[in-house]
Amino acid sequence: MRMMIRIMLADDYYIVKKGLRSLLNNEKDFEIVGEAANGLETVELAKSLQPDILLLDLMMPGMNGLEVTNRLTRVCPQIRIIILSMHSSEAYVQEAFRCGAKAYVVKDNMADELVNAIRKVNDEAIFLSSSLQKHSLADLQNRSQLT
């Protein structure tokens, strides 16, 4: 039996968080422990809650997802961050991993991939959406460790 995976949601759109909560509540080993609507709130709440996984929107008000990732990986390195984004540009993907993200999931192909990403990242692997597989996971991991 799997241990519960404690997940925090961070997205500025209420309906997106509600949809994520609905999707993830179907998984018996997932527990949603908190929600944030902007970057500053995300940092403070994540430091307080110490979730296993932070599902983080790339484009957040106050502080974007890359800034949040960079800050949290320095102060709470045990929190594994999964970036959720509608952007699939290589520059965003590379920067997310360089900042310390463990996964990058594109929102338009997310349901099963997101559940898979959470489990893989919780098991200390990295994950990249199948639509982004032109990027090499090993290359992204090497680049993120070089900086």
Image: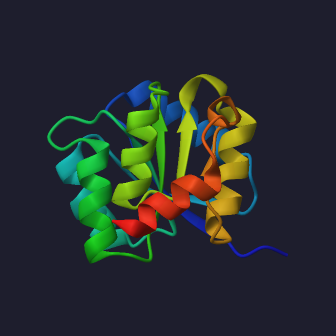
- The color scheme shown is rainbow
The x, y position of residue 51, in whole percent, is 46, 68
**Observer-nearest of 74 and 15:** 74
Count numbered badges in the picture.
Answer: 0
**Screen quadrant of the N terminus:** bottom right
Task: Please name the residue shown 63% across and 71% down the image.
Answer: 124
**Observer-nearest of 12 and 137:** 137
The x, y position of residue 114, in whole percent, is 65, 43
Please say if 38 is above or below 44. Answer: above
- Residue that protrudes farthest toward the left in the picture: 62
Please say if 72 is above or below 78. Answer: above
* Left or right: 104, with 5 as reference point: left
Q: Is residue 9 visible?
A: no
Q: Is residue 131 visible?
A: yes
* Left or right: 141, with 146 as reference point: right
Task: Please name the residue shown 27% across and 36% down the image.
Answer: 60
The x, y position of residue 106, in whole percent, is 56, 31
The x, y position of residue 18, in whole percent, is 50, 33
**Observer-nearest of 12 and 91:** 91
**Screen quadrant of the C terminus:** bottom left
- Residue that protrudes farthest toward the right in the picture: 1
Task: Please name the residue shown 18% across and 44% down the image.
Answer: 63
Task: Please name the residue shown 65% across and 66% down the image.
Answer: 125
